[in-house]
Image (cartoon, rainbow, N blue to C red):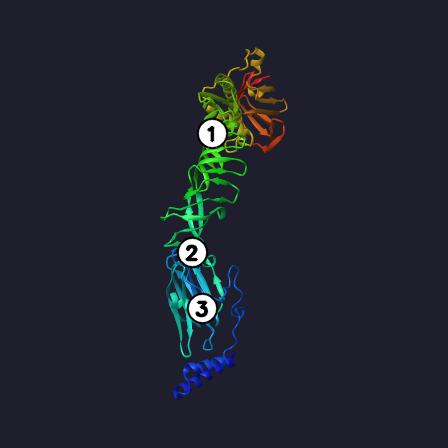
């Protein structure tokens, strides 16, 4: 290469001398020198590494022609051309830095060797370009790319100076006809990233189509994403006029959903029918791509009319049963959660009342009321039992320690019983206390807590305690939470005076109804007030009766 450059410099000196003497025209001499010293044409592979995937090399056998500019949104073309010339030198760089108003443009820098031709497909706009030689800027300006037309940035390599020309129209086409084959050809997918938009329902739109003035235009491909995962695509979507007008088109869902309807604006159109892969069918209003409010036909033949979220019923709505009965204002489609009286519409269209008891449909409202009354009575008993258990636990432990009722299982039973009581304020009073026979004189003589011995129980039988003469005892409790039963057992050592009892507990055990151990825990001892009249033993305000 040094030899070639030296030869070129000698040729320049010879040209200057001959031009002064008038022996030969500069043009003819230049031709002679070029023929003598120009290097053999380099292949595209020598000019630059193979183009990136997705680029193409054009056929140079025929020059390009301006395409029809009838479509103002059609892409245009920007060419950078560095011809192969004996006067040229290396170190050129082409840059397309920015688009004036079109979003998503990807800036480009490309080093060029002699014989280099770069073509960019661009949306119509003005683009900031720069051409430099070894860091020295030779051109820096905004150039216009028109729809369907070619703009050429051409480096004219001269003997003494180089010029960088911006060519349009016929001049551009003429230079392109003289140019070598393309070295790189970058399409829209490489010069622009998708134009991003925000839609309803947390959707992000990615527009692969014409754009101008910061807005999507014309016809193109629209992809819809949620949380970086594609939900659907609209081929040949039409951008509607206006900044927030949106698009029209038919979506194709990635998860197999099928839609009879159109995307209209920023969401699926009202009334569109969506069929899910599992057989569910929805018709109504949408938020983005997702059903919002309407009619959802389930795979078991029932129909939900109301709000829908993630393709499933939510909130309160109307449920149409397979027999045609419509149950109004129910909390979802899980019939096991139905409890109470509901307004219904019979298959004949007549308004009727329906009743459900704990998810089971009742033959009549009277049947429901009978079962509900029995439930209220059972609830009242559970509340009394739970309170009794909680009071005993509270009295037998220091306030600074955790109440045994807060342990897993038993606490849940109390909470369930109290919730039932809140729902049934008219629960009947609890009766059935054990008879209290008159104490004999012998019993009165054995009164006082210091004389306690034997087995005792509360009136409900849910708490039992036993004391032996050796100062040891056992405490047992049982409670219910709905259909669940729980027990609590603990051995203890005790001492007493006539009015106080002191307890020192062993390890306590919690069990479920089947007797399976749920938890073991240590209980702190304590002293509580007591009284005993030979029949009734009161410990911390809870009464136990001798068995």
| View extreme (bottom): residue | 21
Q: Residue at x 51, y 81 (%)?
A: 3
Q: Quadrant of the C terminus?
A: top right
Q: Which of pointers 3 and 1 lies earlier in the amino acid sequence? A: 3
Can residue 451 be seen here? The reply is no
Q: For this rendering, which residue is in front, 182 or 131?
A: 182
Q: Position of residue 337 (x, y in %)?
A: 51, 28
Q: Which residue is mark 2?
A: 104
Q: Secondary structure at mark 2?
A: loop
Which quarter of the figure has residue 292? top left
Distance of mark 2 from mark 1, alpha carbons?
47 Å
Q: For this rendering, which residue is in front, 443 or 358?
A: 358
Q: Which mark is residue 122?
A: none
> Is residue 1 left or right of 23 when viewed as pictured?
right
Question: Against 207, is 450 above or below?
Answer: above
Q: Position of residue 126 (x, y in %)?
A: 37, 61
The label nearer to you, 3 versus 1, is 3
Q: Which of pointers 2 and 3 lies earlier in the amino acid sequence? A: 2
Residue neighbourhood size for the residue with mark 3, other residues' Cα within 10 Å, grouped as few (<14), some (14–19), many (≥20): some
Q: Which residue is mark 3?
A: 177
């Amino acid at each position: 290469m040094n030899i070639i450059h030296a030869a070129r410099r000698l040729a320049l000196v010879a040209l200057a001398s001959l031009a002064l003497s008038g022996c030969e025209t500069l043009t003819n001499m230049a031709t002679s020198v070029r023929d003598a010293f120009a290097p053999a044409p380099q292949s595209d592979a020598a000019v630059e590494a193979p183009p990136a995937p997705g680029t193409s090399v054009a056929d140079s056998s025929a020059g390009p022609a301006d395409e029809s500019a009838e479509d103002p949104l059609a892409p245009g073309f920007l060419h950078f051309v560095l011809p192969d010339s004996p006067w040229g030198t290396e170190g050129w760089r082409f840059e397309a830095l920015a688009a004036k108003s079109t979003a998503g443009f990807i800036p480009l820098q490309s080093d060029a060797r002699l014989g280099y031709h770069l073509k960019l497909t661009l949306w119509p706009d003005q683009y900031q370009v720069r051409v430099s030689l070894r860091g020295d800027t030779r051109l820096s300006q905004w150039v216009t790319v028109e729809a369907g037309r070619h703009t050429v940035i051409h480096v004219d390599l001269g003997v003494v100076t180089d010029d960088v020309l911006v060519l349009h129209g016929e001049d551009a086409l003429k230079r392109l006809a003289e140019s070598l084959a393309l070295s790189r050809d970058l399409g829209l997918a490489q010069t622009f990233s998708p134009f991003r938009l925000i839609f309803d329902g947390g959707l992000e739109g990615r527009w692969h189509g014409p754009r101008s003035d910061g807005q999507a235009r014309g016809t193109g491909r629209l992809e819809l994403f949620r949380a970086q995962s594609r939900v659907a695509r609209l081929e040949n979507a039409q951008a509607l006029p206006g900044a927030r007008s949106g698009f029209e088109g038919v979506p194709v869902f990635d998860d197999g959903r099928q839609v009879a309807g159109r995307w209209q604006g920023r969401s699926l159109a009202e009334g569109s029918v969506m069929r899910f892969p599992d057989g569910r069918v929805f018709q109504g209003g949408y938020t983005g791509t997702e059903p919002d409010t309407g009619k959802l036909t389930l795979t078991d033949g029932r129909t939900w009319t109301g709000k829908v979220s993630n393709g499933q019923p939510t909130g309160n709505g109307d449920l149409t049963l397979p027999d045609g009965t419509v149950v109004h204002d129910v909390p979802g489609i899980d019939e096991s959660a139905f409890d109470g009286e509901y307004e219904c519409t019979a298959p004949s269209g007549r308004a009727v009342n329906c009743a459900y008891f704990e998810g089971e449909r009742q033959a009549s409202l009277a049947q429901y009321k009978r079962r509900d009354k029995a439930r209220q009575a059972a609830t009242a008993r559970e509340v009394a039992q739970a309170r009794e258990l909680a009071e005993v636990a509270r009295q037998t432990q220091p306030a600074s320690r955790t109440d045994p009722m807060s342990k897993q299982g038993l606490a849940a039973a109390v909470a369930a019983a109290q919730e039932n009581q809140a729902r049934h304020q008219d629960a009947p009073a609890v009766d059935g206390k054990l008879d209290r026979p008159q104490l004999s004189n012998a019993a009165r003589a054995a009164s006082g807590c210091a004389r306690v011995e034997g087995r005792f129980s509360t009136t409900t039988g849910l708490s039992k305690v036993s004391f032996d003469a050796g100062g040891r005892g056992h405490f047992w409790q049982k409670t219910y939470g709905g259909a669940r039963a729980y027990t609590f057992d603990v051995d203890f050592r005790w001492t007493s005076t006539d009015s106080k009892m002191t307890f020192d507990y062993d390890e306590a055990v919690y069990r479920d109804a089947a007797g399976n151990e749920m938890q073991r825990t240590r209980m702190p001892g304590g002293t509580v007030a007591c009284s005993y009249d030979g029949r009734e033993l009161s410990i911390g305000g809870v009464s136990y009766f001798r068995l």
